Amino acid sequence: MATRCILASATAAQRRRQKVIEEAPSAVVSPAMREAMGRDAVAAALAVGYRGAGTVEFIVDAELKHYFLEMNTRLQVEHPVTELVTGFDLVEWQLRVAAGQPLPARQDQIELKGHAIEARLYVEDPYAGFAPQTGTVLHWQPAAALHAGVRIDDGIVEGGVISPYYDPMVAKIIVHGRDRDDAIRRLRAALHNAPLLGLRNNGRFLADLVDYPAFFRTATMTTTLIDAWQEQGEALLQRPVAGDVHWCLAAAALAMKQGAGWRADSVAAFGLPVRCDEVQQMLRVQPDRHGSVQVTLGAAVHHLRILSHEGARLRFEMDGVIRSAVAVHHQHALHLALDGDSFVFSEVSAFPDSNAAQDATRALSPVAGKVTQIAVALGDAVQEGQALVCVEAMKMEMWLSAQAAGTVSAVHTALGEQVESGALLIELDLS
């Protein structure tokens, strides 16, 4: 068993030692290099007398020389890309080996067909240091993306709660195309058609990454490039901004849901203050008696009509163009996915709760997690930007820093404590 090997030579992009995207066959591995890797993988297995399914990993330097990295005595998370380009079920092979049966094919019978890419969907915010997220899954319908050449392996359902106790990977989107460009196109379409709503996630980042010149167009990714991009403020990691179509559709959907002056017998216009992330805009909404609405945003006037809203799927016409979106109302907010982007909109209350906003005197936990380090004590003087406390969740450390100079007036946590998202950890006296 140990002398057999599937030479798919998958490559991966990764961040902080966590793979993000895998593909097979590798865009940088030549047939000769693939054969050499196969020989070395077999030699490693023979050297330790290994029998069973397993994966040998190599790392490649700038001169394309490969070096042994590790061997895993199991199938890897990325095994679907190998299955798609070879046509073999590796889980079946694993069971056959364990049962002492011979493998169903020899190496010379294995032919690689097409190109496969796997993207790992993480509930983490790529635009905020990849901070892991917790909360409830409001919308997840992977079947909407299951067209030819698309496979989705997932472990979540609508209504399920994502906790801080596990890895933030919640699904894998795997595609198989006739070539690399075709696989990229299929992956972008699948990510577009199966948005995850309710928690920030890396869906948009993945779609952008596979089309980024340094990644798939020139195949010059390294194991540290994404981390370097984060430090350099690369455009790829700048948070997407909602466009006019998002704002107008959100205003119409919020007005219809909340009945904000929208009645079938009324054409009165009204102002609707809407917030998305840190941006707030005043939109003017004027319905008519035919189910349409005129939305004014700044100096632009748009005409919008919602054609249907069945479940989360919404069809609308805006300025004469019919489009589709996913829209979910939850706790006075609208979670909206359109054209590969996802945003959360809410109507701004005329009577905001002055105690709801975090100010510079309070350090709140950004996620549910474990307090692993406390860098200050009661009575300590701190400077703006000084580290206060560290919370760990989903294999990631998040430090909270002082927003202004002051004195620690209270410490509300202890080392090793499990805290909820938004929990008050440190208080400062700024006087």
Image (cartoon, rainbow, N blue to C red):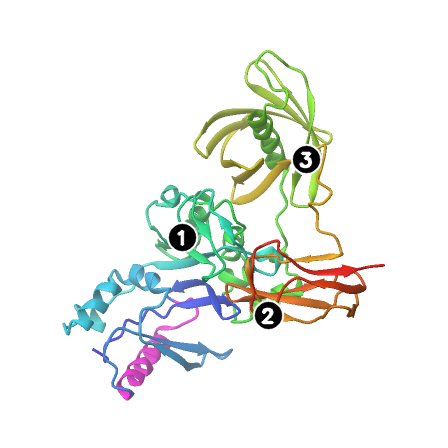
> Image quarter for residue 109?
bottom left
For image coordinates 38% across by 68% down, the residue present is 10
Q: Amino acid at mark 2?
A: Leu
The answer to whether 99 appears left or right of 81 in the picture is left
Q: Residues within 10 Å of mark 3 (few under 14, many from 20)?
A: some
Looking at the rendered structure, the kind of residue marked 1 is: Asp
Question: Which region shows up in magenta?
Answer: 26-47
Q: Is residue 119 above or below residue 30?
A: above
What residue is pinned by disc 2?
Answer: 415
**Label whose residue precedes the other's in the sequence (1 or 3):** 1
Residue at position x 62%, y 53% from top? Answer: 422
Q: Are marks 3 and 2 in contact (CB under 8 Å)?
A: no
Q: Three-letter amino acid code at disc 3?
A: Val
Residue 41: say if magenta.
Answer: yes
Q: Position of residue 18 (x, y in %)?
A: 48, 67
Work out how far the residue at label 1 is from the one at label 3, CA to CA, in angstroms: 43 Å
Residue 348, label in figure: 3
Whether residue 384 is visible, yes or no, is no
Judged from the image, the secondary structure of the residue bearing numbered disc 2 is loop
Mark 2 surroundings: few (<14), some (14-19) or many (≥20) residues within 10 A = few
Question: In this image, 80 relative to 164: left or right?
Answer: left
Residue at image location 57% in from the left, 57% down from the top? 367
The residue mark sitting in front, 1 or 3, is: 3
Residue 234 located left or right of residue 326: right
